Amino acid sequence: GENVEQHPSTLSVQEGDSAVIKCTYSDSASNYFPWYKQELGKGPQLIIDIRSNVGEKKDQRIAVTLNKTAKHFSLHITETQPEDSAVYFCAASIRGTASKLTFGTGTRLQVTL
Amino acid sequence: KAGVTQTPRYLIKTRGQQVTLSCSPISGHRSVSWYQQTPGQGLQFLFEYFSETQRNKGNFPGRFSGRQFSNSRSEMNVSTLELGDSALYLCASSLSSGGINEQFFGPGTRLTVL
Protein backbone atom coordinates (compact mmCIF):
# COMPACT_ATOMS: atom_id res chain seq x y z
CA GLY A 1 0.00 0.00 0.00
CA GLU A 2 0.86 3.67 -0.08
CA ASN A 3 3.18 5.20 2.51
CA VAL A 4 3.52 8.96 3.03
CA GLU A 5 6.33 10.55 5.01
CA GLN A 6 6.15 14.16 6.17
CA HIS A 7 8.83 16.56 7.46
CA PRO A 8 9.39 18.43 9.65
CA SER A 9 7.17 17.36 12.54
CA THR A 10 7.31 20.86 14.05
CA LEU A 11 8.08 24.18 12.43
CA SER A 12 8.34 27.58 14.06
CA VAL A 13 8.53 30.72 11.93
CA GLN A 14 8.21 34.42 12.54
CA GLU A 15 5.22 36.26 11.21
CA GLY A 16 5.83 37.30 7.64
CA ASP A 17 8.36 34.55 6.93
CA SER A 18 7.73 31.60 4.63
CA ALA A 19 7.08 28.02 5.73
CA VAL A 20 7.77 24.88 3.72
CA ILE A 21 6.52 21.39 4.53
CA LYS A 22 7.71 18.39 2.54
CA CYS A 23 6.18 14.97 1.88
CA THR A 24 7.27 11.89 -0.01
CA TYR A 25 5.10 9.05 -1.21
CA SER A 26 5.91 5.50 -2.17
CA ASP A 27 3.38 4.35 -4.77
CA SER A 28 3.90 5.65 -8.30
CA ALA A 29 0.21 5.00 -8.96
CA SER A 30 -0.75 7.85 -6.62
CA ASN A 31 -2.32 10.69 -8.56
CA TYR A 32 -4.01 13.00 -6.02
CA PHE A 33 -2.28 14.96 -3.27
CA PRO A 34 -4.35 17.14 -0.95
CA TRP A 35 -3.17 19.22 1.99
CA TYR A 36 -5.23 19.70 5.12
CA LYS A 37 -5.05 22.15 8.00
CA GLN A 38 -6.31 21.03 11.38
CA GLU A 39 -6.95 23.47 14.19
CA LEU A 40 -7.47 22.40 17.78
CA GLY A 41 -10.82 20.73 18.31
CA LYS A 42 -11.71 20.72 14.63
CA GLY A 43 -11.63 18.32 11.75
CA PRO A 44 -9.06 18.66 8.95
CA GLN A 45 -9.83 21.43 6.46
CA LEU A 46 -8.80 21.06 2.82
CA ILE A 47 -6.60 24.02 1.90
CA ILE A 48 -5.16 23.05 -1.48
CA ASP A 49 -4.69 19.97 -3.61
CA ILE A 50 -2.75 18.96 -6.71
CA ARG A 51 -3.19 16.23 -9.28
CA SER A 52 -0.42 14.22 -10.86
CA ASN A 53 -0.75 15.95 -14.24
CA VAL A 54 0.16 19.31 -12.70
CA GLY A 55 3.55 20.40 -11.37
CA GLU A 56 2.52 23.42 -9.33
CA LYS A 57 -0.63 25.08 -8.06
CA LYS A 58 -1.04 28.35 -6.21
CA ASP A 59 -3.85 29.91 -4.23
CA GLN A 60 -3.02 33.32 -2.77
CA ARG A 61 -0.35 32.74 -0.09
CA ILE A 62 -0.37 28.96 -0.45
CA ALA A 63 1.32 26.91 -3.15
CA VAL A 64 1.98 23.24 -3.69
CA THR A 65 4.61 21.66 -5.93
CA LEU A 66 4.80 18.08 -7.13
CA ASN A 67 7.81 16.17 -8.43
CA LYS A 68 6.52 12.84 -9.75
CA THR A 69 9.96 11.54 -10.63
CA ALA A 70 11.22 11.99 -7.09
CA LYS A 71 7.81 11.18 -5.61
CA HIS A 72 7.68 14.20 -3.40
CA PHE A 73 5.40 17.18 -2.98
CA SER A 74 5.67 20.30 -0.86
CA LEU A 75 3.46 22.96 0.68
CA HIS A 76 4.68 26.54 0.65
CA ILE A 77 3.07 29.24 2.76
CA THR A 78 4.31 32.78 2.21
CA GLU A 79 3.83 35.84 4.42
CA THR A 80 2.78 33.68 7.35
CA GLN A 81 0.26 35.04 9.84
CA PRO A 82 -0.58 33.92 13.40
CA GLU A 83 -3.82 32.35 12.13
CA ASP A 84 -1.72 29.98 10.00
CA SER A 85 -0.68 28.26 13.26
CA ALA A 86 -2.13 24.73 13.12
CA VAL A 87 -1.23 21.16 12.26
CA TYR A 88 -0.83 20.52 8.54
CA PHE A 89 -1.24 17.10 6.93
CA CYS A 90 -0.28 15.97 3.48
CA ALA A 91 -2.04 13.01 1.92
CA ALA A 92 -2.01 10.88 -1.19
CA SER A 93 -4.42 8.56 -2.91
CA ILE A 94 -3.89 5.90 -5.53
CA ARG A 95 -5.59 6.10 -8.93
CA GLY A 96 -9.03 4.51 -8.74
CA THR A 97 -9.31 4.77 -4.94
CA ALA A 98 -9.36 8.53 -4.53
CA SER A 99 -11.42 8.43 -1.36
CA LYS A 100 -8.84 6.28 0.42
CA LEU A 101 -6.39 8.91 1.57
CA THR A 102 -3.07 7.96 3.15
CA PHE A 103 -1.92 10.74 5.43
CA GLY A 104 1.47 11.96 6.53
CA THR A 105 2.19 12.26 10.24
CA GLY A 106 1.54 15.99 10.37
CA THR A 107 3.53 19.18 10.89
CA ARG A 108 2.76 21.48 13.77
CA LEU A 109 3.33 25.02 12.46
CA GLN A 110 3.71 27.84 14.94
CA VAL A 111 3.83 31.41 13.69
CA THR A 112 5.28 33.74 16.28
CA LEU A 113 4.86 37.50 16.44
CA LYS B 1 -24.27 25.10 2.51
CA ALA B 2 -24.06 23.08 5.71
CA GLY B 3 -20.90 21.11 6.28
CA VAL B 4 -20.41 17.54 7.40
CA THR B 5 -22.06 16.90 10.74
CA GLN B 6 -21.15 14.17 13.19
CA THR B 7 -22.98 13.02 16.29
CA PRO B 8 -22.31 12.71 19.08
CA ARG B 9 -19.28 14.95 19.47
CA TYR B 10 -18.06 13.21 22.60
CA LEU B 11 -18.62 9.72 23.92
CA ILE B 12 -17.33 7.75 26.89
CA LYS B 13 -17.67 3.97 26.92
CA THR B 14 -16.17 1.09 28.86
CA ARG B 15 -14.26 -1.89 27.51
CA GLY B 16 -16.44 -4.55 25.97
CA GLN B 17 -19.27 -2.20 25.06
CA GLN B 18 -20.23 -1.27 21.55
CA VAL B 19 -20.73 2.18 20.04
CA THR B 20 -22.44 3.69 17.01
CA LEU B 21 -21.34 6.97 15.48
CA SER B 22 -23.31 8.95 12.94
CA CYS B 23 -22.30 11.14 10.01
CA SER B 24 -24.41 13.34 7.74
CA PRO B 25 -22.56 14.37 4.56
CA ILE B 26 -22.76 17.66 2.74
CA SER B 27 -26.00 17.89 0.79
CA GLY B 28 -25.53 16.27 -2.61
CA HIS B 29 -22.48 14.28 -1.57
CA ARG B 30 -22.91 10.56 -1.96
CA SER B 31 -19.60 9.18 -0.72
CA VAL B 32 -18.74 8.97 2.96
CA SER B 33 -15.37 7.88 4.30
CA TRP B 34 -14.37 7.23 7.90
CA TYR B 35 -10.97 7.80 9.48
CA GLN B 36 -9.51 7.16 12.90
CA GLN B 37 -7.11 9.73 14.34
CA THR B 38 -4.83 8.90 17.27
CA PRO B 39 -1.61 10.53 18.52
CA GLY B 40 0.32 7.32 17.89
CA GLN B 41 -1.00 6.17 14.51
CA GLY B 42 -2.14 9.46 13.04
CA LEU B 43 -4.98 9.55 10.54
CA GLN B 44 -5.93 6.12 9.25
CA PHE B 45 -8.57 5.20 6.69
CA LEU B 46 -11.30 2.88 7.97
CA PHE B 47 -13.72 2.48 5.05
CA GLU B 48 -15.71 4.27 2.38
CA TYR B 49 -19.36 3.95 1.47
CA PHE B 50 -21.02 4.99 -1.75
CA SER B 51 -24.56 4.21 -2.83
CA GLU B 52 -25.05 2.15 0.33
CA THR B 53 -22.12 -0.13 -0.60
CA GLN B 54 -18.70 -0.39 0.95
CA ARG B 55 -16.24 0.62 -1.77
CA ASN B 56 -12.90 0.62 0.03
CA LYS B 57 -11.66 -0.77 3.30
CA GLY B 58 -8.63 -0.06 5.47
CA ASN B 59 -6.69 -2.43 7.69
CA PHE B 60 -8.90 -2.56 10.73
CA PRO B 61 -10.37 -5.63 12.47
CA GLY B 62 -13.90 -6.79 11.81
CA ARG B 63 -15.05 -5.12 15.04
CA PHE B 64 -15.20 -1.94 12.97
CA SER B 65 -18.13 -1.85 10.60
CA GLY B 66 -20.27 0.68 8.88
CA ARG B 67 -23.27 1.25 6.72
CA GLN B 68 -24.83 3.90 4.58
CA PHE B 69 -28.47 4.77 4.16
CA SER B 70 -30.34 5.79 1.02
CA ASN B 71 -30.06 9.48 2.02
CA SER B 72 -26.24 9.06 2.12
CA ARG B 73 -26.05 9.37 5.90
CA SER B 74 -23.61 6.88 7.35
CA GLU B 75 -23.01 5.15 10.64
CA MET B 76 -20.01 3.29 11.92
CA ASN B 77 -20.10 0.74 14.68
CA VAL B 78 -17.35 -0.55 16.90
CA SER B 79 -18.10 -3.69 18.87
CA THR B 80 -16.30 -5.11 21.90
CA LEU B 81 -14.49 -1.86 22.57
CA GLU B 82 -10.83 -1.94 23.58
CA LEU B 83 -8.79 0.77 25.31
CA GLY B 84 -6.87 1.27 22.07
CA ASP B 85 -10.08 2.30 20.28
CA SER B 86 -9.95 5.64 22.08
CA ALA B 87 -9.57 8.13 19.26
CA LEU B 88 -11.10 10.92 17.25
CA TYR B 89 -13.31 9.39 14.57
CA LEU B 90 -13.64 11.57 11.52
CA CYS B 91 -16.10 11.37 8.71
CA ALA B 92 -15.43 12.89 5.30
CA SER B 93 -17.83 13.36 2.43
CA SER B 94 -17.26 13.79 -1.28
CA LEU B 95 -19.44 14.03 -4.35
CA SER B 96 -18.80 10.56 -5.62
CA SER B 97 -16.40 7.63 -5.52
CA GLY B 98 -13.55 6.30 -7.62
CA GLY B 99 -12.41 9.41 -9.44
CA ILE B 100 -10.72 12.37 -7.79
CA ASN B 101 -13.16 14.19 -5.55
CA GLU B 102 -12.34 16.61 -2.80
CA GLN B 103 -13.05 15.23 0.65
CA PHE B 104 -14.50 17.47 3.33
CA PHE B 105 -14.20 16.46 6.95
CA GLY B 106 -16.59 16.84 9.84
CA PRO B 107 -15.52 17.91 13.34
CA GLY B 108 -15.21 14.32 14.53
CA THR B 109 -16.49 12.25 17.43
CA ARG B 110 -14.10 11.95 20.36
CA LEU B 111 -14.45 8.42 21.76
CA THR B 112 -12.92 7.58 25.11
CA VAL B 113 -12.83 3.95 26.21
CA LEU B 114 -12.32 3.38 29.93
Image (spheres, grey):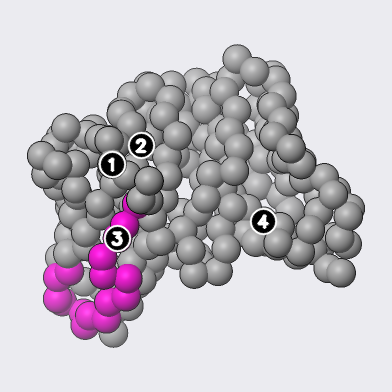
Q: In this picture, is A83 found above or below A5? A: below
Q: Are marks 4 and 3 on the same chain?
A: no
Kind of residue at disc 1: Ser
Q: In this picture, is A54 found above or below B89? A: above
Task: Name the residue carrying label 3.
Answer: B6
Q: Position of residue B55 (x, y in %)?
A: 23, 32
From mark 3 to mark 2, how far is it between C-alphas? Answer: 15 Å
From mark 4 to mark 3, how far is it between C-alphas? Answer: 25 Å
Number of numbered markers: 4
Q: Point out the frontmost of discs 2 and 1.
A: 1
Q: Is residue B75 shown left or right of residue A65?
A: left
Task: Name the residue carrying label 1.
Answer: B27
Task: Name the residue carrying label 2.
Answer: B94
Q: Which of the pair A21/A4 is nearer the observer?
A: A21
Which chain hosts label 2?
B
Specify few, some or many for label 1: CA neighbours under 10 Å numbering under 14, 14-19, or 20 or more.
some
Q: Are marks 1 and 3 on the same chain?
A: yes
From mark 1 to mark 4, how far is it between C-alphas? Answer: 31 Å
Check residue A112 for magenta coloring.
no
Which chain hosts label 3?
B
From mark 4 to mark 2, how far is it between C-alphas? Answer: 25 Å
Q: Point out the frontmost of discs 4 and 2.
A: 2
Task: Name the residue carrying label 4.
Answer: A107
Q: What residue span does the magenta drawing correspond to?
A: B4-19
Callout 2: SS: strand
Kind of residue at disc 2: Ser
Q: Position of residue B112 (x, y in %)?
A: 32, 78
Q: Is residue B114 shown left or right of residue A43?
A: left
From mark 1 to mark 3, how far is it between C-alphas? Answer: 14 Å
Question: Is there any visible trace of residue B92 in the rendered image?
Answer: no
Tell me the residue at 81%/54% (across/down). A80
